[in-house]
Each structure stands twice: as C-alpha cells, then as structure tokens.
Image (spheres, rainbow, N blue to C red):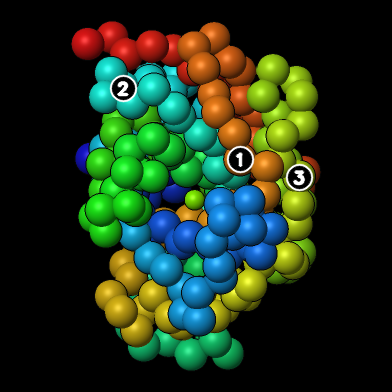
C-alpha cells in the first residue's frame, strides 16, 4: 500500500489502479510507426511499479532496452462511473508528472505476437511519479508543458494541448470501461522523443512550473 506525496498538502491518499493510454500524440504514434486509434488504447500498470522523486529506476535482467515516456498523470478524487466530459474534471483530485517506463524490446516482441503489454510496462520501478499538485492550482490540464531531460539534455518537449483526446474525454472513456475510484491514476500517454535510458542516466521530468520529478537509472539488484 503506497500513498501519494503532495506538494503543499498533508493529505493521505492511497495509490489505486494505474491506467495507461497509448498513442495519444500523433508524432509519437508516427515515431513508433503506428497510427492513432479511433478510441483510446488502454493498458494497466501495477501500483507496485511506483517510485517517487529522487528514487531509482532499476533495469530488469529480462530487458536490454528501457525507454522513457513523460506523461501527464491525472489522479481521481472520487468514484466515477459513466461520467460525461462536461462533468469529468469535477472528479479529479490533482495532477502529477509521471514516467511510463517501458521495456521496449519486450513490448515490440509482444506487439508482434499479439500479446498484452503487461510485462513490458509492469516491472518494479517502472512508474516514477512526482508530488501531486491539487487541481485548483492548475488553470487548464489541456494546456500544460511537458519536458523530459536525460543528463540535462532535452529529449521530450511538448504540451498537453497536442493530445488527440482532452483530459475530459479520457476520463469519460475510461469511466465507461471501469469504475474509477479515489486514488486511481490515469497516465495520459507520451509525446514524441521517446528513447533509451541506461545505467547511470539521470532523468528530470517537468509539468509546467507545477511538478518536477528527478530519478536515476541503475542496473537491477537481483
Ligand atoms: Mg506511455
């Protein structure tokens, strides 16, 4: 059981299920040589993958190619089921910047075989998340800068306004598939610029001026 960490709050909220979206930015879909889907493409990531600011991503022995994906994370504040876009933001508690770490070699193999992405997305330490900023501090979740640097070099830089779906539409869609509960986290997908990370790298992710997340990368301790 893991709780969120907050910026400017002592709240204790448990991290629930983690829902990932894929192919939500056209340029990222293109760099993966794939297409935007008509409806959001979902996967799940286990809560056991979560780490926080100043912690370490571990390279599992099963993979030789980890990729960074910087994303806006939406944290739900109350139970939401079949919510319309109009009311979707009423159910949001806050936002984080999240890294959807992916074992790209395992994922590519799974895609070829038509297998799920659970292994590629699910290793321990594959979901670094920042402290949460509460909803009221953010003017518009659909206009937030996302930046990721690796060893101080900018690798991903975009804005959530370039997402194919709005945050409201994402909540509507996901809540029509599965009931969303307080503490659940939606990772909204990554812009272009994804790339490999290796032992010794230092990653810094930013969501506007609201959230900063710094993690490093090390070999597995197994
Ligand atoms: Mg992703």
- Residue 180, position in %: x, y? 33, 71
- Residue 42, position in %: x, y? 38, 65
| Residue 194 numbered mark, or none | 1
Quadrant the N terminus occupies: top left
Mark 2 or mark 1: whose residue is earlier in sequence: 2
Q: Nearer the viewer, residue 142 or 94?
A: 142
Q: Which mark's residue is nearer the viewer, 3 or 1?
A: 1
Mark 3 or mark 2: whose residue is earlier in sequence: 2
Q: Secondary structure at mark 1?
A: loop
Residue at 46% x, 62% y is: 21
Q: Secondary structure at mark 2?
A: loop
Kindly identify which residue carries mark 2. 60
Q: Secondary structure at mark 3?
A: strand
Residue at 45% x, 29% y is: 66
- Residue 121, position in %: x, y? 35, 43
Q: Is residue 106 above or below residue 82?
A: above
Q: Nearer the viewer, residue 30 or 151?
A: 30
Q: Nearer the viewer, residue 135 or 28?
A: 28
Q: CA distance from mark 2 to mark 1?
A: 19 Å
Residue at 53% x, 61% y is: 34
């Amino acid at each position: 059981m893991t709780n969120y960490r907050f910026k400017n709050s002592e709240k204790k909220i448990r991290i629930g299920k983690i829902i990932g979206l894929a192919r939500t930015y056209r340029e990222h879909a293109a760099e993966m040589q794939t297409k935007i889907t008509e409806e959001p493409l979902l996967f799940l990531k286990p809560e056991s993958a979560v780490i926080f600011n100043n912690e370490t991503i571990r390279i599992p022995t099963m993979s030789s190619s980890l990729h960074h994906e910087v994303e806006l994370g939406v944290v739900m504040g109350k139970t939401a089921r079949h919510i319309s876009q109009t009311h979707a933001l009423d159910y949001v508690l806050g936002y984080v910047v999240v890294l959807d770490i992916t074992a790209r070699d395992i994922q590519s193999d799974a895609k070829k075989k038509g297998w799920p992405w659970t292994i590629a997305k699910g290793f321990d330490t594959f979901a670094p998340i920042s402290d949460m900023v509460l909803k009221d501090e953010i003017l518009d979740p659909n206009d937030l800068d996302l930046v990721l640097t690796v060893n101080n070099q900018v690798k991903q830089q975009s804005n959530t306004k370039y997402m194919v779906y709005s945050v409201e539409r994402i909540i509507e869609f996901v809540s029509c598939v599965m009931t969303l509960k307080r503490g659940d986290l939606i990772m909204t997908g990554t812009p272009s610029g994804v790339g490999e990370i290796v032992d010794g790298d230092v990653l810094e992710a930013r969501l506007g001026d609201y959230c900063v997340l710094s993690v490093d990368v090390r070999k597995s301790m197994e």
